[in-house]
Image (cartoon, coloured by chain):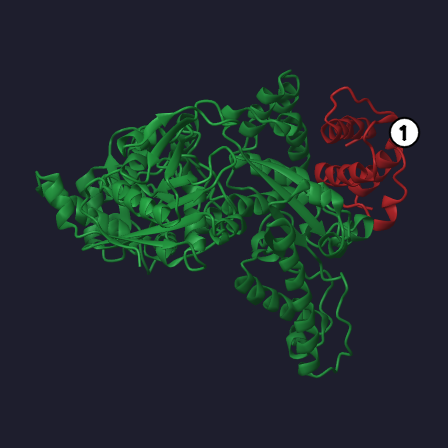
Chain colours: A green, B red
Amino acid sequence: MEQLAWLPVHDDLGTALSVARRIPDPGERLARAMHLAGFRRDFTATGRLDRLAEVGLAAPPSQLGLVPLRLAILASHTVDHLVPGIRIAGLHRGLALSVHVAPYGSYRQSLLGDDPALAAFAPQLILLALDAQDSPIDLPLDSAESAVEEAVAARIAELRHLWRRAKERFNAQVVQQLLVPASPPIFGSYEAMVPAAPRSLLDRLNAGIRAAAREDGVLLLDLVAQMAGQGPADGLADPVRWHQAKQLVSPTMAPLHGDLVARIAGAVLGRTRKCLVLDLDNTLWGGVIGDDGIEGIKLGQGNPTGEAFLAVQRYAAQLGRRGIILAVCSKNDAAVAEAAFANHPEMALKRGDIAAFLANWNDKAGNLRQIARQLNIGLDALVFADDNPAERDIIRRELPDVAVPELPDDAALYPAWIAAAGYFETAGFTADDAARGRSYAANAARQAVLEQTTDLEGYLRSLEMVLTARPIGPAELPRATQLVNKTNQFNLTTRRYTEAEMQVLAADPDSLALSLRLADRFGDNGLISVVLARPDAALRPGEWLIDTWLMSCRVLGRKVEEATLQVLADYARRQGITALIGEYRPTARNGMVAEHYPRLGFTPMAPLPDRPEGTLVWRYETRGSRPFAHPIALDTT
Amino acid sequence: MNDKEIYAALTQVFRDVFDDDDITLTPATTAEDIPGWDSQAHVNLVVAAETRFGIRFRTAELESLHNVGDFVQLIATRRKGA
């Protein structure tokens, strides 16, 4: 596979770049670079894009909606040539990345000693890019296994010390690059039998890094696994580039490398796609069901094409099980399409796996909008997979927020292409993710009950809802951080925090970091809301600023807000807080909560200093205010 | 590909790498003549030329690429399969 194969090819990127370079306004140049970053590009074009974006990125216009993030790279090899690829891939994902590269080989000094430049930069994300040649473990080849284990353990302990320092000093999320084998094996296949052989050592170090990272909340960058089969075979650990410039990653692979780093940065900020929308004919099965009929389509074992489409379905089903919402968008007769799911014996995807099923003859852009509405997610949460190049092209033009991967003309390769695009990269995996599929099925059951009832209050009472409020602790931290970073609609202030920043807030005794779960008789909706409240320099003592109030749109319209306010006011009173100050910071996406605070009985007040334009401020007295009625039982023990 | 065609293609490589459509090359053009032609840009140039012409320079040859004439000569040699 060519690198960035999932991105469409531009007719003439070189000319487009030359034209864009002459745009006088840096912000407009940046917008143009953002658009062009969505096309397949080599490292030279990526470098040109970076120059196009450079000035604008220093102060990006707010209408581009870019999320700023400071990334420091601490490396034991040359990485300067990789920075443009990282910035441009970040831009493609809606991130305004500032990248700081610490002097080559000085990572210990940077973390353990004093590095004023790094301290001034205040990284939020630190990529620790070390290589196998850096302080190698040198043991006689006939060393006992125990001696090797001891040496490996010592190296892992040193790394963990560095990670801890990075967290303590900078409150940064650490990303550790796994070691890349840079020299050939000396034993061949027998290598693993010799504990002290170089490749053996490297495998053991990587295994140790993986285990330690899992325990310490460190993320991994696995270049070997993620670059395999993509781009030139000598793009990683090319000895010529190593001897010439100490480059572990060749410039030829900079675009893919940048994408791998940027997708992790995006995941840390919750910029991950949530939903895979699938076409049907020649995407999930071979042939056209309307013409060929159930018995005519190619799906299942016994024929290579059928096997290939079955593998596509299995891959989608696996994504479903890890919490990616699945949807269908197809030009088909609804009854015919549904019948395939109901009656074809070889379908790996079941109708119950599909959260939104749109098979009709309307245009697909409209259907994708409908899917986003139905699932209460943004268009920028969708990935649309369709074998038809014309449909892909239309969606890219009509709905630029939807990710539309190029697909090869062989279904056997679809899963690898979709996987390579990294749309669903994540910084965590929680029980709530695994349960998401079931949760959408339960939502369908709730919907069915609701449609039979004419009495909304009676319906809500019949759900027997229980809202469980807990201060955010280690168990809630990953999911709470995920919500903070990906909730766009029901989000009063859209402040984003890394897990490390959330931890600091949660540990502050003068503040409140609250997680809320909602269960009902149809099942557990999981952790659905986060409220952060804290003292603020702009307020008087005894007042809390509601720094963050957000909620998953899955539980809209169920009076969870009213119940949450009751919980919040109780906590506040117990801490001696007399007033809650709520802010609404408008964005392009959160119009639905513009009236949130007045609806809950807050009264308007004068704006606070240093707030973005359009911010509205509201006040709620915790004493004397009567809680709103709601049909939800509270569990706050 | 004759030397003239190599010059034309290499000129485009230089223009792309340095993002400057005004670059014109002569055999005597060196790093002194082109702003930004530092050691990192040199690696970028080498890799861009390798990609454009479908060749690989040998490690020992990387030290002898002092001016554009050296580049063209080596590209011509490599393309002949030497």
Residue A606 appears in the rendering:
yes
* Residue A443 in picture, x, y percent from top left: 23, 48
Q: Position of residue B61 (x, y in %)?
A: 87, 46
On-image quarter of the C terminus of chain A = bottom left
User: Label 1, on which residue?
Assistant: B32
Looking at the picture, does residue A527 appear above or below residue A327?
A: below
Q: Is residue A498 above or below residue B67?
A: below
Task: Give x and y (percent) for residue B11.
Answer: 78, 27
Q: Is residue A221 left or right of residue A490?
A: right
Residue A286: in sight, yes or no?
no
In the rendered view, tell whether residue A355 sits above or below residue A431: above
Answer with the quarter of the image where residue A585 lies.
top left
**Amino acid on which the number 1 mark rests in the picture:** Glu
Nearest the eye: A316 or A347: A316
The structure residue drawn at horizontal position 62% and vertical position 25%, both measured from the top left corner, is A56
A312 sits left or right of A502 in the view: left
When asked about the image quadrant of residue A581, the answer is: top left
- Direction from residue A396 to residue A632 in the image, left or right: left
Could you tell me which residue is drawn at 26 percent across and 37 percent down? A625
Q: Residues within 10 Å of mark 1 (few under 14, many from 20)?
A: few
SS class of the residue under badge 1?
helix
Residue sitting at x 67%, y 74%: A191
Q: Between A7 and A597, which is closer to the camera in this rendering? A: A597
- Please name the residue shown 63% across and 43% down the image: A71
| Image quadrant where residue A287 sits | top left
